[in-house]
Amino acid sequence: MKLRRGSVIALILSPLAVGLILAIFLQSPGVTNPVLRFQIRADLGTLILIAGGLLTASALGFWSFRRRANTRLRMAVENVREEAKGERRRFLRQLDHELKNPLTALQAELAYLAEGVPIEQTGKVLRDMNDQAERIGRLITDLRKLAQIEEQAFEREPVDIGELLQEVVEAVQDHPGLPERCLHLTLLQSPWKLPPVPGDRGLLWLACFNLVDNALKFTPPSSEIEVRAFEVSPWLVVEVTDNGPGIPPEDLPYIFEEFYRGKNVRGCPGSGLGLALVRAIMARHGGDIAVRSRSGQGTVFTLRLPLAS
Amino acid sequence: MEGTHILLADDERGITDYLAPILERAGYSVTVACDGQTALRKVHELHPDLIVLDVLMPGMDGRQVCRQLRAAGDWTPVIVLTRVSTTTDKVLSLEEGADDYLCKPFEPQELIARIRAVLRRKGSGKPGKPLSMAGKLRSGELVLDRKARRLKKSRQVIDLTPKALALLEYLMLHPDQVFSRDQLMDAVWGWAQPVASRAIDVRIAELRHAIDDDQQTTYIETMTGIGYRFMVPVESADEEAR
């Protein structure tokens, strides 16, 4: 039989509680509290035996308690280790996937070229080969970024998020997806300005850029994208919203995992690491990222960054 | 081969755009599907002679497509394009029912060789389940029980290391097909490395010694400068077990 921790403690304490209640009751006025006198006679040998037995019993109790606690701790550590191992295996397997597709395409393109193609077609084949090579390059760059974010020390300086978001919006002005979509930036800074956030400016820029870039990539033309920032003490909140088709509920729990590509976005360009990068950047700043999405209505990504205390 | 129709299903346009014309130049007519559902629909509409399925596709993946076809009694030859090389288990899934597996990345010529081999096997043998679905394989006096991982020759159990057994299994699943040492390394070990392909020679020697190759029958033939080939016809031995 397995007892809960609470019930075990209650069971251990119950004799003391009963004793206490009875003692208080017997001490109260008007209650007969008889005085009992005991006399124990025993030889020294028996007394020593009893004392030794009691000591051994309590030592045994303590030892078995410690042993159980240790086993539990060891099992917990083992579980965490197994989980990490599993995660690493999954990561390597996915990396394998992501690298092998562009490589297969490159090999097919090379074979196609080698068989001899009309001169006017070579330009297109070479461009396609270049695209695949760039895709592998992007993947490797993103992997390096991810490793750096998780491992490297970074400087904290006050970052003006309003200004940073303006820069992100400027940076996507030549994004191929922008002309067909509507992008708004709203900074709620009345009556006071948005307070600065302590952090790494470059990384925060990358996090915001990735979210806006995703919105431009994964929404259909004529979608509306809104970037907004506001203060909800002790956080500074950045939201990137779109009125696209939304993310299927079955994909939602996994979109921040490395290389996870939702059902609707396979075939879209990208390394599959963008949101994993955002999550890692938020974690390093003591913040977090959340997502809400409704099918056919749109998606809201919310970044929360802690303000300087 | 004239008029042989292949359905190529992969969601990666960079691959299908170039693989399809290469297959066409090899003499096949090719239809491309970009996801699992479309592939399934086109199988019903067009009745291709062979299907090449990528594992990861949106909607329904290649393995599901293969399973659905087999469950419906459709035995059109299937080659599955996998991306994960995790040693033997990738090649030998009994339930899926693909005729062959090819690991990405591959050279297009390799795919063409596999397509030819699968079509040849289908053409010569009885129509029906592919060898890959057989729990027991028989060739001459050899019976390989794939589930129990046991080899018998003339009812005598033969001791083999797991890797040698996996190698024999792979060769028996692809009878009369020539494999280079690198290809066998990739299929059985999960990765190919030029210096390590000596390991294949060692295992082949172990296999030959264990099954007394060349005494009466030559099972495994050495193709000098190329690799190895399993020479004796292989069939499923599932029926007789029942």
Image (cartoon, coloured by chain):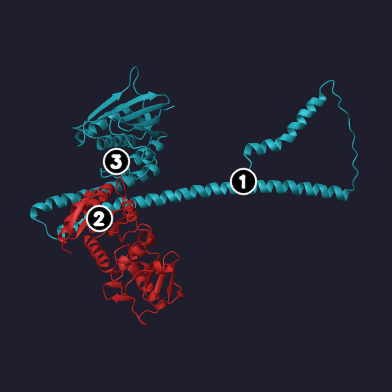
Chain A: what color?
cyan
First in residue order: circle 1 vs circle 3: 1
Earlier in the chain: of badge 3 and badge 2, it is: 2
**Display colour for chain B:** red
- Mark seen at residue A69: 1
Which residue is label 3 attached to?
Answer: A264
Q: Which mark is residue A104?
A: 2
| Real-space CA distance between mark 1 and mark 2, rounded to the nearest whole angstrom | 52 Å
Q: Amino acid at mark 2?
A: Thr
3 and 2 marks on the same chain: yes
For badge 1, the amino acid type reads Ala
Q: Is residue B11 visible?
A: no
**In the visual, does B201 lie left or right of A309?**
left
Name the spot of residue A242 as percent of width and height, x first.
29, 30
Q: Nearer the viewer, mark 1 or mark 2?
A: 2
Amino acid type indicated by mark 3: Asn
Q: Residue B16 in the image: x percent, y percent?
A: 21, 52
